Amino acid sequence: MNKNFLALGLAAALLVPQVAGAEGFGINEWSAEGVAMGGARMFAEDDAANVAYNPASITKINGKAMKSSYTYLSPHGNYKLYDGAGKEIEDGKNVVHAGWAVGSYYVRQINDKEWFGIGAFPRFAMVSEFERASKASTNAFFSKLNGVSVTPTYAHKFDKKWSAAVGAEINYVGLELQKNSYHPVAQMNVGATQTEGESYALGWNAAANYAFDDKNEIGVVYRSRITHSLEADFKMYPVSGGKITADAYGVVTLPDSWDVGYNHKFDKKTRLELKATRTNWSTYDALNISLSNPSVPGVLPSNVDSAKNWSNGWRYAIGLEHNFSDKYAAMAGFAFDEASIPYNGGDFMVPTGLRRTYSIGARYNDKKQTVAVALGWMDVGNLDFAGHATDAYKSAHAYDSFTKIASISYQRKF
């Protein structure tokens, strides 16, 4: 029976979901409870999603648990485009293209000292879409990064105060970029392009918890950077007709990050979490794509380069959880995410400024199962960025952007 449960858990965790983040690039929505607490969810009791939020806390699970989570993200926003003299030449809004963040988790207690866990959840993903006939489309009219991390994890509880975990990360990305190719001299669109490819790469993570006493605990989680060598297919559809194809290649490094958290229990019913996340976005310095073996020689450039030069940033979160009884609980959270995109590195792939997220949620649980729901509203803020040489504008202003969030989770204990 135990082997059957383990096989079922592994199968659930290894199902690679189709995921896409809405506003932004980094994803923190890994469970309904995590959404409700603004991502400050590092010290939860009996929660299999600890595999994602804090692997060292899977030692808080007794027995075996499986969990699935589904989070819906719907982005909305407006923009204005300007020419070289600062005159407005276009205003518009994004095409609402909602995304899903899906998480699957399995944790098993091996003995009083050891635990095994595995999860499949998105750490990096995004989707954005704009009208194909707009001037913004010369930068990007459809951008999508599907991402999922599979994280087998081993955790050890040394004593009542210390626990630690180490794990591998198998990271998948599927990238699709579409834009209109703009000729700056002729000032016209000469055709649409599509770049599409996928890659697998390896990383690792480590975590540790220390409990000062029954009421106070701290934890730290490190996740390594992951470098993807992306092989893709490039297609161009000239306005004159036909199709040009080529092989595309690029290197993208997903950043490493640190999470530092603090948990305080006021009493048996109420607790507060604080969390700070440092993400080294400076690894995203450029998105350069090399083209080779074109079907029509001499037409396509050998390189399509785009400087990004993002800066490292912090995310701060606070979460509150209150148990009304043994079965019912309420949660609330707030998160502030610094803007990391410079003026000369912004684009319509990720038109995101600083983010403030407000969230609430509720949970029902008995001895065998847990159901949680959450709602959130993300104020994405404004972002100003420069156009590139091949864009039909000189500068852009994204404003009044926000994302609606809804999440549900279900956990079963064995």
Image (cartoon, rainbow, N blue to C red):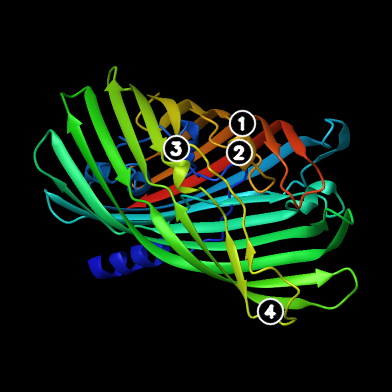
Q: CA distance from mark 3 to mark 2?
A: 12 Å
The residue that disc 3 covers is: 34
Density class for disc 3 (Cα within 10 Å; few <14, some 14-19, many ≥20) is: many
Q: CA distance from mark 4 to mark 1?
A: 45 Å
Density class for disc 4 (Cα within 10 Å; few <14, some 14-19, many ≥20) is: some
Dot 4 or dot 1: first in sequence order is 4
Q: Are circles 3 and 1 on residues that touch, CB within 8 Å?
A: no
Q: For the residue marked with disc 3, what is the amino acid?
A: Gly
Q: For the residue marked with disc 1, what is the amino acid?
A: Trp
Labels 4, 3: front one? 4
Dot 3 or dot 2: first in sequence order is 3
Dot 2 or dot 4: first in sequence order is 4
Q: On the image, which quarter does residue 24 sit in?
A: top right
Q: Give me the disc on residue 377.
A: 1
Q: Give me the disc on residue 168.
A: none
Q: Position of residue 258 (x, y in %)?
A: 34, 39
The residue that disc 2 covers is: 405
Q: Residue drawn at (74%, 49%), measured in percent from left and top?
A: 389
Q: Position of residue 288 (x, y in %)?
A: 57, 59
Relative side of 163 to 354, left or right: left
Q: For the residue marked with disc 4, what is the amino acid?
A: Pro
Under circle 2, the secondary element is strand
Q: Are circles 4 and 1 on residues that touch, CB within 8 Å?
A: no
Q: Are circles 1 and 2 on residues that touch, CB within 8 Å?
A: yes
Q: For the residue marked with disc 2, what is the amino acid?
A: Ile
